[in-house]
Image: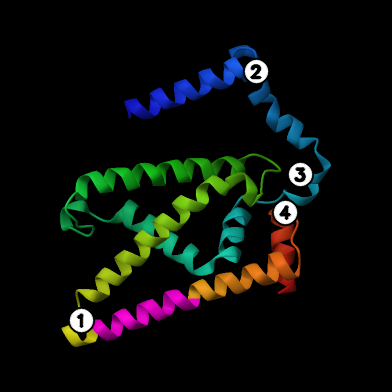
Amino acid sequence: MAGGLAGLAITIGWLAMSVGGLSVFAKIVTSIPSSNAGNQYAIEYQSGPGYLLLRALEIMSPVAAVLCLVGWGVLLFSDRQLNLLHGSAEAANWRVVSWITLFMLAYLALPMVLPHWLNLRYISVLFGPFYLIAGLGFWYCASLCWNRLRTFDRRIFAGLAIAALSIGAVADYDRFQRIFVRDALKDLSIKMVLDADKRN
């Protein structure tokens, strides 16, 4: 916690020095929402209810979106004492992933509550944590099934799990080819992503 606060203080200090002082930095940061509200592109292409940002993530990678929800559920609702997440350094791993999830949820909430900020470009820093938490969700689902299977059935299950993930990855790549290469999507604003989904 102290390291995170120190990092935040150093970052704010560095940015403030770069623009001419803390008051200038504060003025810039506080004027961003109002200037974005006057941006015609933002009004037309980045407006709507906040949940559309989650829908855009689901459009881009549906399998990962579902697994990310499972991962969030594991982190929020599972009981560590029941060893639902086990490993050699369970407590440390749990804390790290919990902090990553907290950062992800806080960062994701910003464009969802600010008007005219619905653009996947603004949350691109979350793509790594998104897939990390999706990996946790997959691992949890696989562990639940794995522990209930006999040795022979485990081999079949492992093959099916690998095949399912491979199909999901190929589908994501195909979606990328259709939306970004063939249709030449120019931006990740919510309107463009939703329109691209309707065309495909």
Quadrant in the rendering for residue 9: top left
Q: CA distance from mark 1 to mark 4?
A: 45 Å
Cα distance between the residues tagged 4 and 2: 28 Å
For label 2, count other residues whose C-alpha is less than 10 Å away and answer few (under 14), some (14-19) or many (20+). few
Mark 1: give few (<14), some (14-19) or many (20+) Cα within 10 Å: few
The numbered mark, 2 or 3, whose residue comes first in the sequence reads 2
Residue 133's place in the image compared with 43, above or below, is below
What whole-number distance in Å separates the C-alpha atoms at marks 1 and 2? Answer: 60 Å
Quarter of the image that includes the C terminus: bottom right
Q: Identify the residue shown where x is 18% and y is 58%.
A: 83
Of tags 1 and 2, which is closer to the observer? 2
Judged from the image, the secondary structure of the residue bearing numbered disc 3 is: helix
Q: Quadrant of the N terminus?
A: top left
Instruction: Work out whether mark 4 precedes mark 2 in sequence or the reverse, and give the earlier one.
Output: 2
Look at discs 3 and 4 and give the one toward the viewer.
Answer: 4
Q: Earlier in the sequence, mark 3 or mark 4?
A: 3
First of labels 1, 4 by sequence position: 1
Say whether residue 166 is magenta: yes
For the residues carrying marks 1 and 4, which lies nearer the camera in this image? 4
Residue with the mark numbered 2:
19
Q: Residue at x 67, y 19 (%)?
A: 27
Tag on residue 18?
none
Mark linked to residue 187? 4
Amino acid of disc 1: Leu
Q: Nearer the viewer, mark 2 or mark 3?
A: 2
Q: Amino acid at mark 4?
A: Asp
Q: Are marks 1 and 4 in contact (CB under 8 Å)?
A: no
> Residue 42: which numbered mark, if any?
3
Marks 2 and 4: in contact by CB < 8 Å? no
Between discs 3 and 1, the one toward the N terminus: 3
